[in-house]
Image: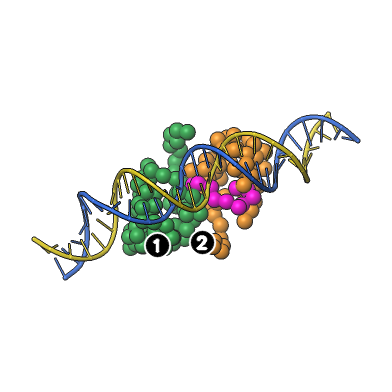
Chain colours: A orange, B green, C yellow, D blue
Amino acid sequence: MKNLKLKAARALMDMSQKDLADAVHVSRQTINAIEKGDYNPTIKLCRDICRVLNKTLDDLFWEEEEDETV
Amino acid sequence: MKNLKLKAARALMDMSQKDLADAVHVSRQTINAIEKGDYNPTIKLCRDICRVLNKTLDDLFWEEEEDETV
DNA sequence: ACTTTATGTCAAGTATATTTTACTTTTTAT
DNA sequence: ATAAAAAGTAAAATATACTTGACATAAAGT
C-alpha cells in the first residue's frame, strides 16, 4: 500500500524524490518505490528518511495490520 | 550497537529468542543478530516484532544519531 | 552430576532490497 | 506551445537480509 504520509512529509519540506534520495544516499527509484508502497525498506533507511524529514518512525512507517501474505 | 530495548521487551513477555522468531516467522539467528545489533532488519520485520511485543517502532527501533559510516 | 533449554556465533546458500540504465508520462514554468 | 523538471515504471545486475545446519557455551531444572 502507498506511503502517502511519506509523500506528504516530503512535500512539506519542499523536496523532490531526487532531493530526498540524495539526502539519504539512495537512488531516486528507491524513494519512488517506497512511496509507491510495493516494498519493504530496511530500518536504517527508514531512520535516515525520518531524520531528514523531521519525523519519527511511528509517524511515517507504522501501518495497521494488513494481509501480509507470507 | 546492541538492541537492549528489544531484549528487554522480549523478556517482559517471557519469550525466548526462538519463541519470538517463531511468532514472526524468521529464524532464531535473525532475532539473535538483531539483538546483537550488527544488522539492519527490514521495516516489515520490525513492525511484526513490535506487534508481537506490544511496542511501537519508536519504542524498539529508534536510535540516536550514530556514525553510520556509509 | 546430568539433561534440557536458551543463547552466541560461523560459513555457505537463497531471497530480496537497492542500483543502474533507460524510456514514458505528468507537472511546472517560461 | 514548448521546454525543463519531476514522477512513474521496468529489466538486469549487485549488495545484503535472512535461512539452514552445525557446533559451543551458559543457564535452569531434575
Find out whether the residues at labels 2 and 1 contact each other: C-beta distance under 8 Å. no
- As for residue B31 lying within the magenta part, the answer is no
Range drawn in magenta: A34-43
- Between residues B33 and B67, which one lies in front from this camera angle? B33
Callout in the foreground (2, 1): 2
- At 45% from the left and 36% from the top, the residue drawn is B68
x, y percent for residue B44: 51, 54
Q: Secondary structure at mark 1?
A: helix
What's the chain of the residue with tag 2?
A: A
x, y percent for residue A59: 56, 51
Q: Which circle marks residue B22 in the picture? A: 1
Is residue B55 visible in the rendered image? The answer is no
- Choose top left, top right, bottom left or bottom right for residue A9: top right
- At 39% from the left and 49% from the top, the residue drawn is B34
Q: Which circle marks residue B65 in the picture? A: none
Look at the picture and state if C23 lies above or below B46: above
Q: Is residue B15 left or right of residue C2?
A: right
x, y percent for residue D16: 46, 42
Q: Main secondary structure of the magenta part?
A: loop
What's the chain of the residue with tag 1?
A: B
Q: Amino acid at mark 1?
A: Asp
> On the image, numbered disc 2 is attached to which residue?
A70
Q: Is residue B13 left or right of residue A51?
A: left
Quarter of the picture containing the N terminus of chain B is top left
- At 56% from the left and 62% from the top, the residue drawn is A66
Is residue B60 visible in the rendered image? The answer is yes
Q: Is residue B17 left or right of residue B55?
A: left
